[in-house]
Amino acid sequence: MTEAIVVGGGVAGLVAARDLAKAGVHVVLVEASGTLGGMVRRHTVAGIDLDMAADSFATRTDAVSTLAIELGLGNDVVAPDPRGAWLMTRSGRVAPIPATGLLGIPGSPMAADVLAVVGQGAAFRAQLDSLIPSPVGAKARSLGELVRKRMGARVLDDLVVPIVAGVHSTHPDDLDPDRVAPGLRAALQREGSLARAVLALRERATAGSAVQGIRGGIVRIVDELVRDMETYRVDVRLHTRATAIERAAVEVRGADGTTERLVADHVLSAVPDPHRPAAPNRTGIELVTVVVDQPALDAAPRGTGMLVHPDATGVRAKALTHATAKWPWLADAADGRHVLRLSYATSAADPADVGTSLPIDPRSETGVRATTDATTLLGTPIAPEDVLGAARVLWNGPDGGASGLADGVVGIGEGSRGRGLAGIVDGTRSAVRGLLGS
């Protein structure tokens, strides 16, 4: 039998190990920590089991829903509440996210929901996109440059920046349009305007929500992947750190300090080369979850949550998810309570602190910051005494993932196969099919 070593026990590693083992390959999976799932884990706040990080997946491909069906979760794939999210501009203006956009790029610049965000002057400038020759901006090196040339700086700043920052944690000027909006550039040339290109891509997309979730939490995918690996007898080694990753071998060190050299026909890695220095500009994310008793939130005053312009004044959170408004199954589990998740940009944390859920006192600095921001973003007073439970989790942003690996090592995961759960699953399964020759 062909043997394979998978380095990293996050979703990419679990999917790779499961698919290889299901095909009859003998697989060894090594994970430095004592927990499988990577960023997809659960924690309990005020007695409610919640996703510790991602609570949804993009539906631009059917990669995750197909995997869910294979894992027996097909009947538990659910769409979020259709009320949708709101956004906050740099100046603090709040409004629902326009209905016909793509990453904030409006498909109908003069629509009422666009005017409510950018104003009449900026909307008129964006409408001029229909008169600008299609080659203008077509070769833009960034999404920001493309939008700025076609629709103007105001639409970019008020609409695209807060949405892209919330989805990709990056400014549009630092994103390749071909990576985050595949087909947009070609549609611009074909349709003659950026707005019509957005509408064409939306029309061709699968009907339904842009994201979906799993009843009971995204973490159930990890639960089922782990069960499948037990069924297919994957050799899982926790507390085992890769100290060298080569084309056909991995050197590992166990928790007791003993070392071993594992040899295989194939090596797949979701982690960077151990000898490559960490990215100097690596960022972190602080996710604060609060469970509150506040009946005024029953009406979901800001829909399913808020995306915030990075430079908005008076609020420090970059996004808020009103999770019990977003997911009806969670509202049922919460039994009248409300779950709010606020995310903050921060510096990269020590790996030992990453992924640990720590309870917080609502009257602590972190707790007061969360309730103050929630009050501002939701337009509803939320006091520390309304909080029934709160927790804080630190995550680190991408570190180049599996980039910089030795020749012959198959990179999987966020660093080499695409960001977000959909990109990770799709890219990893594609890589495995390539190894299996199918």
Image (cartoon, rainbow, N blue to C red):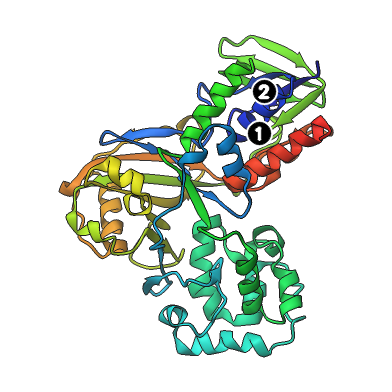
Q: Is residue 25 left or right of residue 48?
A: right
SS of the residue at dot 1?
loop
SS of the residue at dot 2?
strand
Where the C terminus falls, by quadrant? top right
| Within-10-Å neighbours for mark 2: few <14, some 14–19, many 20+ | many
Q: Position of residue 168 (x, y in %)?
A: 56, 56
Q: Is residue 348 visible?
A: yes
Q: Position of residue 81 (x, y in %)?
A: 39, 56
Name the residue type under label 1.
Answer: Val
Where the N terminus falls, by quadrant? top right
Q: Position of residue 287 (x, y in %)?
A: 40, 45
Which residue does the numbered mark 2 point to in the structure image? 242
**Quarter holding residue 426:** top right
Of the residues under marks 1 and 2, which one precedes in the sequence? 2
Mark pair 1, 2: CA separation: 9 Å
Residue 23, above or below 303: above
Tag 1 and tag 2, C-beta contact below 8 Å: yes
Q: Is residue 398 left or right of residue 213?
A: right
Q: Which of 344 and 265 lies nearest the eye of the viewer?
A: 265
Name the residue type under label 2.
Answer: Ala
Which residue does the numbered mark 1 point to in the structure image? 271
